[in-house]
Amino acid sequence: MKIALLIAAVSCLTFPQDTPTATFTEPFVGFQFKHSKAWTIVKSTKRKDSARTTFSIPIEGSSDKAELDIDRTDYHASIDLWQTIQLRANEQLHRQMVRQWTQEVLGVSMLFSRVEYTERGTAMTSVLGLFYTKTSQKMLIRLSSPAGSFDKVFYEFGQVLETLKSVDGKLPEEDDPSKELAPAPKKPERADLAPHPIDSPKNHKNQAKMAPVAIEVVVSTRKLNLRIPEEWKGEGIKDNTLQVTGPLLSKPLHIELFSLLDSDPALTALTKVSSTSLANFVKVDRREDTGPTNNRAGCSVSSTWRTGTDAKGSLMTCEAAGSMGGYYFVLTYSQTDAVAYKADRKLIEQLLKTISLEIVP
């Protein structure tokens, strides 16, 4: 299924080194993450035995606070049904559903819904996220803040999400509603919180390895490095776009970088660009789809390859997308020479095995 964020790649996409952090461990579903020490836990006065944890998050440059709720819920059905439930629930609350999307975390889908509403006269934005693990009880998060500060708060939450890991050292599995799960216990059972070194070779054989060449690109005011193999180069960088060339590659690859904060999910973007490419064909003889699968650097990569003809003759294309840490790239390539395409495809496939993204500190 969808795999994007390998634990071994977390070090590339976490807090700046000068940010003091603390570690929070969710006691029932068995996950933990690092967060700024400036966050404080708000004690609940409603339920003595509540499994919910609420963080109060200071917003830089503002006296307002954001809130992050960490809870759990019993859910074992399809992704589409969950998203539909959120849509209908917010309609009843007269809240505007801005968008719904899926982000890959530790190889499992995190199902997000973003809504806007007014609370005590203040415009608010909230994101609800369900960690779609193969467990009867799933981690549920809700991040809320005044609308004007939400993008800043969500970016900080994205950094926190990059540090998420299971306490037992095992990678979680994606849920499959067609298979039965053991029912949730009537009385919540605490997870085994004994620490396990999840980055050790014993627990994680396929260590993520970043490609050596770093090309700096600005995406939504944030500096990212596009990591590519040795002897590959980035040229013609303009805003979030660039051309990537490689040894023996017959023509440059066009690559655009995006942020999930203000763009479609990676697979949606790939579908759109692939549909645009399809319009150039008169006839498609063969189509091949790969992924999403994690590559050597922990980047979740999908691709679509087509061969056929256009109005002038042979046409071969490739569209690919790779997501990592709330950002992703979209790659496009086309060729009319069958011999060149055959050689280029091997080179592009090798590139997709190592390409990745990292935030510039």
Image (cartoon, rainbow, N blue to C red):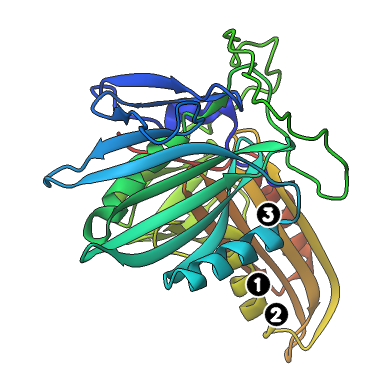
Q: Nearer the viewer, residue 19 or 126?
A: 126
Horizontal placement of 76 versus 207: left or right?
A: right
For residue 73, which quarter of the picture? top right
Q: Farthest residue toward the bottom?
A: 311
Q: Nearer the viewer, residue 6 or 316?
A: 6
**Label 1: how many residues lie within 10 Å, few (<14), some (14-19) or many (20+)?**
many
Q: Check the picture and name the quadrant holding the C terminus.
A: top left
Q: Residue at x 23, y 54 (%)?
A: 149
Mark 1 element type: helix
Instruction: For marks 1 and 2, give the CA distance.
Output: 6 Å
Say what secondary structure mark 2 lies in: helix
Q: SS of the residue at dot 3?
A: strand
The span from disc 2 to disc 3 (Cα, nearest Å) is 17 Å
Residue of label 1: 274
Where residue 190 sits: x, y (%)? 62, 18
Query: Residue at point 39% right, 37% down?
Result: 159
Circle 2: residue type: Leu
Residue 99 image position (x, y, % from top left): 49, 67
Foreground tag (2 vs 3): 3
Badge 2 density bin: few <14, some 14–19, many ≥20, Cα 10 Å: some
The residue to which callout 2 is attached is 278
Residue 199 visible in this rendered orientation of the protein:
yes
Mark 2 and mark 1 in contact (Cβ < 8 Å)? Answer: yes
Identified by mark 3, the residue type is Ser
Left or right for 19, reference 336? left
In the foreground, 243 or 260: 260
Please give the residue where the numbered disc 3 appears in the rendered image: 302
Q: Give left or right: position of 192 versus 76.
A: left
